Structure formats: C-alpha cells, structure tokens
C-alpha cells in the first residue's frame, strides 16, 4: 500500500507544478477550490488532487471521488484530522480504512459512510472503546479489536472473517427454512417467517456477493409479502399513507393511492363493512375478492358476528363507486392476529442474523380510535 500511495503522490507533485487545471470542477462542496489533474467535460475525471476545506488525492469520475484515493478532513469539519484511504463510488466510501485522529481504525466495507458487511474497529487503548463494544472486543497486539458483521455502523454479530460470516448466514437461513417446512403454522405466522427468510437472503446476497450499492432496498421492495406491508407501519416515511375512515368517506384520499386504515369490521355477503366505532352509522365497504383463500376464510370466522365486530387493519386502495368510496383490499389483518407476530421465536443465531440486516422486529402498534 505504501508503494501505491508513493506513486500517487509522485504523480500529483508533477501535476501540481503545472498549476491549477482550468475550467475543471469538483462537485463535492467540501473539496471545491483548487484542482490539479485530469478533466473531462468540465469535471474532474481520472487521477487528480482537490483542495477545498478538505483534501483528496486519487481517482475521480464526473467530478466526484470514484476509485482508489486518500481523503483528509481539515479545519472546520466535525471530523478534522481523520483520514480515509480506500475505494470510493460516486463520492461515497465503499471499502478501505478510516483512521480517526485519536488512532481508532475502522476497516472493511462501507455503505453511506458506515461500516456495512464484514469489518472491524481497532481501539489503541481501552479508554477509547465505545460503550456498546466494551464486552465484544478482543485483545489485539497493542490494542483491542471488535470484528464481525455490521449494518449501518451497528455490530450485528461477531465473526472473524467473511468466510465465517457467510457460514453463519447459511446456517441461519437453513434453520428458518427447516422451521417453515417442519412446523404447522397458521397463515399469519407463515407471513412473518417467510418474510424473514426472504429478507435474510436479500442481506446475504448484498453483503457476501458484493452486489451494487442500494441492492438491499431494491431486493426488499420486490418481496411480495403481506408482512412487508405490516412492517411499513413502523416507518416514518410510510405513516403518511395511514388514513382514518372519516377521511376516506369525505373523499380526502386520492383514488388508487395505497393506504392503511383500521376499523370495526363485519363480514357481509362476500365483503366487509368497516366502521370507525360502534356508533358509526355509515360504513365503508371493503372488497376482499383479491385476498387468498386462507385469509378470506379467517376473516369470515372472525368477523361473521355483526353484534361483535372484529377489529381490523386494512391495506388497499380506495375507489369511488357512485357517490360512495370503497376500499379494494390487498391485505386485511385482525388486531388479534397482528398481536401474534410478536410471538414468533427462533434461535439466537437466526435472530441475530435477521436483526443485523436492519429490519427491526419492532412494529408500530396501530391504535384503533
């Protein structure tokens, strides 16, 4: 690595003597100032050196660090004195070594500037160890090391190499598959377990097959699972799609917009009448023909008694029929079945693998009002 860096700096010393490259911009505002190096279509492209508030020496593409290089944070930055040496993609760190000014070293794969995948943190002294790592470090030469699988800067589980991490993932996924095939589960448990299985496979593909940045989100978005919709209740971005029945009745929700709503339901001739309360005289009809057979049968059994309506959460899209609004349901779940999702259990190893990928087991509790 020293030889490579030496060659970089020798090249940039020569380039620097020729003066600032004319009409060549760097897109990162923290590096915008002086630039020496190769240029294409008015932007830094190829090997170069940028000096703004911070400094970067290395490869550029379309005005951003891209490829191998060295970045140093300077005065005025919250990370003054920190240095990163490694690979960039579209201005983001992807794999390399991040050295804190105080000597702590983060090494491995990065996603959005955080350790993600297999990686490690080296602490030169015990007083620098972050509290969440106190019980997880091992003595390493003149300092302390914590290595394992990371997600968004958080340690998911410990492993000593990519091969070891890969083995643990394979075991966890195999365990979930055996659980699904070897146990009698009701439909809501199958939803949850199948989603966990597919999620684990998404994470494994991204972390251990070196697929492109952004793949986890793309992979998860393609999972066709009712449980994914239920998980969405817990995310701030998706709470904007939660509407009350009164908002739907008043036409305040655009047709064909995916929504989540809730109410008291009664099964009536193939559909569900949904009311906001026992005193609500005007119900919203929920069309359930798109639901699978097991789900539909479960709703009939739970919601057939009009004197004891069931409490439901509905995922679907509203549409106008005459002067009234109805909901075309994608998924419907009773509050009692929703509570069962908390009771799924498996081994510590499988749970750690699932939790490590960043899909929390905590679900926003929809309160019927």
Image (tube, rainbow, N blue to C red):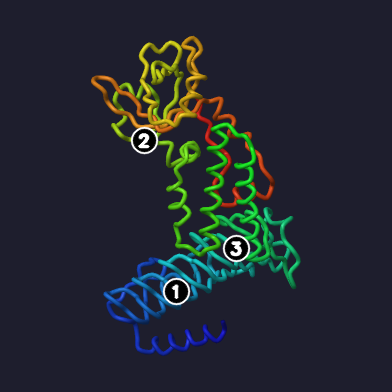
Residues at discs 1 and 3 in contact (Cβ within 8 Å): no
Q: Position of residue 313 (x, y in %)?
A: 46, 27
Q: Earlier in the sequence, mark 2 or mark 1?
A: 1
Quarter of the N terminus within the rendering: bottom right
Q: Which mark is residue 258?
A: 2
Q: Residue at x 45, y 19 (%)?
A: 265
Which of label 1 and label 3 is nearer to you?
A: 3
- Helix, strand or loop for disc 3: strand
In the displayed structure, 47 sits above or below 365; it is below
**Residue at mark 2 to residue at mark 1: CA–CA distance:** 41 Å
Q: Residues within 10 Å of mark 3 (few under 14, many from 20)?
A: many
Q: Residues within 10 Å of mark 2 (few under 14, many from 20)?
A: some
| Quarter of the view holding residue 35 | bottom left
In the displayed structure, 237 sits above or below 213; it is above
Q: Position of residue 213 (x, y in %)?
A: 45, 61
- Helix, strand or loop for disc 2: loop
* Of 297 and 213, the residue lying toward us: 297
Q: Position of residue 349 (x, y in %)?
A: 68, 50
Which of label 2 and label 1 is nearer to you?
A: 2
* Of 56 and 145, the residue lying toward us: 145
With 32 as the anchor, is 168 left or right in this view? right
Q: Earlier in the sequence, mark 3 or mark 2?
A: 3
Q: Earlier in the sequence, mark 1 or mark 3?
A: 1
Q: Which mark is residue 67?
A: 1
Q: Which residue is mark 3?
A: 118
| Quarter of the view holding residue 324 | top left
**Residue at mark 1 to residue at mark 3: CA–CA distance:** 20 Å
In the displayed structure, 296 sits above or below 206; it is above
């Amino acid at each position: 690595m020293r030889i490579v860096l030496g060659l970089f700096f020798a090249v940039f010393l020569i380039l620097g003597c020729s003066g600032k490259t004319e009409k060549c911009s760097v897109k990162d505002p923290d590096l915008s100032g002086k630039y020496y190096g190769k240029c294409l279509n008015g932007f830094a492209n190829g090997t170069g050196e940028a000096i703004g508030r911070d400094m970067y020496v290395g490869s550029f593409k379309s005005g951003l660090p891209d490829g191998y290089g060295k970045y140093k944070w300077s005065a005025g930055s919250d990370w003054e004195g920190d240095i990163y040496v490694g690979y960039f993609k579209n201005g983001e760190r992807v794999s390399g070594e991040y050295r804190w000014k105080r000597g702590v070293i983060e090494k491995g794969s990065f996603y959005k500037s955080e350790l993600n995948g297999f990686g490690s943190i080296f602490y030169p002294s015990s007083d620098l160890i972050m509290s969440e790592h106190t019980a997880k470090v091992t003595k390493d030469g003149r300092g302390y090391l914590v290595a394992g699988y990371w997600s968004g800067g958080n340690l998911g589980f410990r492993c000593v190499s990519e091969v070891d991490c890969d083995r643990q993932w394979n075991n966890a996924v195999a365990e979930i598959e055996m659980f699904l095939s070897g146990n009698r589960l009701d439909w809501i448990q199958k939803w949850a377990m199948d989603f966990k299985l597919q999620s684990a496979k998404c994470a494994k593909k991204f972390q251990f097959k070196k697929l492109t940045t952004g793949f986890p989100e793309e992979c998860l978005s393609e999972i066709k699972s009712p449980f994914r919709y239920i998980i969405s209740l817990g995310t701030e971005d998706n709470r904007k799609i939660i509407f009350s029945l009164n908002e739907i009745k008043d036409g305040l929700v655009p047709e064909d917009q995916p929504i989540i709503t809730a109410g008291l339901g009664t099964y009536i001739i193939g559909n569900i009448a949904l009311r906001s309360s026992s005193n609500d005289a005007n119900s919203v009809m929920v069309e359930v023909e798109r639901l699978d057979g097991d789900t539909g049968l479960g709703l009939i059994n739970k919601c057939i008694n009009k004197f004891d309506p069931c409490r439901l959460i509905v995922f679907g899209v509203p549409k106008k029929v005459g002067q009234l609004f109805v909901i075309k349901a994608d998924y419907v779940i009773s509050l009692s079945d929703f509570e069962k999702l908390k009771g799924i259990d498996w081994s510590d190893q499988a749970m750690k693998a699932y939790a490590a990928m960043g899909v929390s087991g905590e679900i926003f509790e929809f309160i019927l009002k």
